[in-house]
Amino acid sequence: MNLHKSKPCEICTNHAIYKNGAISKNYSPIVTDNNNLILPDDESAIREFYKDGKILITGSTGFIGKALAEKLLRTCKDLSKIYCLIRPKRGQSVEERCKDLLKSSVFDRIRAEEDGEKLLSKITGIPGDITEPNLGVSEDHQKTLLEDVTVVFHSAATVKFNESLETAARLNTVGTHRVVLFCRQMPRLKALIHVSTAYSNADKEEIGETVYPIPGNITCDMYPNDVLPSELLKKIGEKMEKNHPNTYTTTKAMAEWVVAEYADNIPAAIVRPSIVTAAWKEPFEGWVDNISGITGIMMGIGQGIIRSIICDQRLVVDIIPVDIVVNTLVVSAWHVSVCRSNAIQVYNCTSGTLNPLSWEELGAITQRHSLDLPSKHVRWYPGFTFRTNRFMHLISEMLFHFFPAFLTDTALKLTGSKPMMLRIIKRFKIMAQTGEFFALHQWNFASENLSGLQEAMEHPYDCEVFNVDITGLDWDSYIKQYILGIRKYILKDSIDTIPVAQKKLQRLYWSHKAFQVMTVAIIFKLIRT
């Protein structure tokens, strides 16, 4: 099997797409005049691309999916419809889940607009399941989607690091395969964008904007019209898993291979975000709706719950705001449609090489703003240490995580309240353990294609509204807004409570000092005896 290479994005200059000073032979401009690609001066090329379009989003109820739907509705108002593929979950019907999606705070900005309800009515929930043939949709919905859809964003996946290989492969690899096979039947399709992860090749230190091969001499000719057999996927996954940190990165790498092999005859691209974090600017500064990954760690630090973390603080933590990810998805669909390449385009949507931030800097800024902007939900005086020594981390966990949690729960029981601290500490421990590999390693992600997307946009509206340039982000102000976003959207804590929280923090400070003195005294006494 050949290595699938993605070439750097061509730069649109003087209304033409050039490559080494000449029009690329691999690209077919939409409108040409003397071999030049003409873009209207009086309107946005990206808005024009989505005009009257019908979009299909998988994973629309997830963090990226709902932010993507909001962005498209708000900035490309002339699009016709957004179909959200949704499956029933935890006793909720598709209709109920779609209603919950539309109630999300992500759409508050649209709701405030005069035509807000009209825009939101463009979202339609479609019952389905990516792991089923034809995405598990009814015949009527199949007909509608296959005839109408112009752009597909495939964001659905399991992001659990501890998922079994069988389950992860079914959701991430087989699911992607079924999406690609479905898209191949769409006559009006302009672009298929697959949302992967920058860590799909975590077994490599240098990661190019390229799809890497998987073990075995497998080609799409062997299974041209159906998904790869589960037994074959299992064997491939078991070989790859030896060099990967978890089943998530393993099966996402396999999914990329599927896209490269089976989507080679349709305009397709792969976008690889690193660690997706709160919004930089849109829909609101600091918007976030879950406590996964970095968000949970920052919240734990701010609440004083997390005091020791396994991490090499000298390394770069590659985080990327969700709105930059969404903009990359929106722009990449336009770009691969305009620039018809024979190779699958890959965009590493990362910050590490363009605007690096170390774990040490992230921790220090988080600590400072957590003390300046405390939440009323703060449980202990914030203070933590990054450690690489596991023995010292274990001691710190027992002394500063589990022991205080045990005392707090005991006090809650005595007062007739429900104990909860040990449960919270255990949850954070699992979260920290699953992310340890990424806190102890560093990768160098190529970013030429991502940078090329920004350069490819000529219209001022496009450059501003669909910005994918991370170099202008100031990490200090961003993390401050991130912490305020956690307060507002996760903890439901108004900024009006800050004065009260600061008084509580002062009391916790003296309690913390008293606890430290007591701990030292106990240790000293144990040593003497």
Image (cartoon, rainbow, N blue to C red):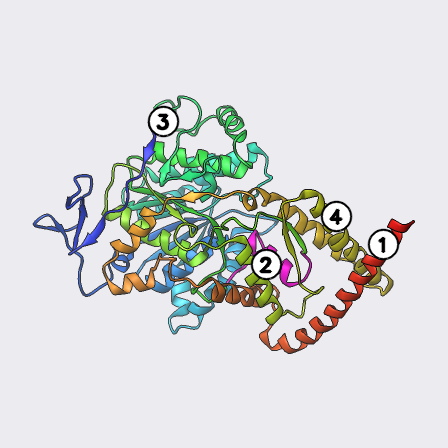
Tell me the CA gap for discs 2 and 4: 22 Å
Tell me the CA gap for discs 1 and 4: 16 Å
Query: Marks 4 and 3: which is nearer the front?
Result: 4
- Magenta span has 500? no
Mark with earlier residue (1, 4): 4
Amino acid marked by disc 2: Met
Residue toward you, 29 or 385: 385
Determine the secondary structure under disc 1: helix
Residue that label 2 marks: 298
Tell me the CA gap for discs 1 and 3: 68 Å
Residue in the image at 48% along x and 55% along y = 357
Residue that label 4 marks: 395
Mark with earlier residue (2, 4): 2
Tell me the CA gap for discs 1 and 2: 33 Å
User: Pointer 1 and pointer 3: residues touching (CB < 8 Å)?
Assistant: no
Q: Say which quarter of the image contains residue 321.
A: bottom left
Tell me the CA gap for discs 4 and 3: 52 Å
User: Pointer 2 and pointer 4: residues touching (CB < 8 Å)?
Assistant: no
Image check: 284 left or right of 405? left
Determine the secondary structure under disc 4: helix
Residue that label 3 marks: 220
Furthest-left residue in this view? 34
Amino acid marked by disc 4: Ile
| Crowding at mark 4 (Cα within 10 Å: few <14, some 14-19, many 20+) | few
Query: Tag count in the figure?
Result: 4
Residue 507 visible to the viewer: yes
Residue that label 1 marks: 524
Query: Marks 2 and 3: which is nearer the front?
Result: 2
Q: Residue 104 appears at what percent x and percent y?
A: 51, 62
**Magenta residues?**
287-306
Residue toward you, 190 or 505: 505
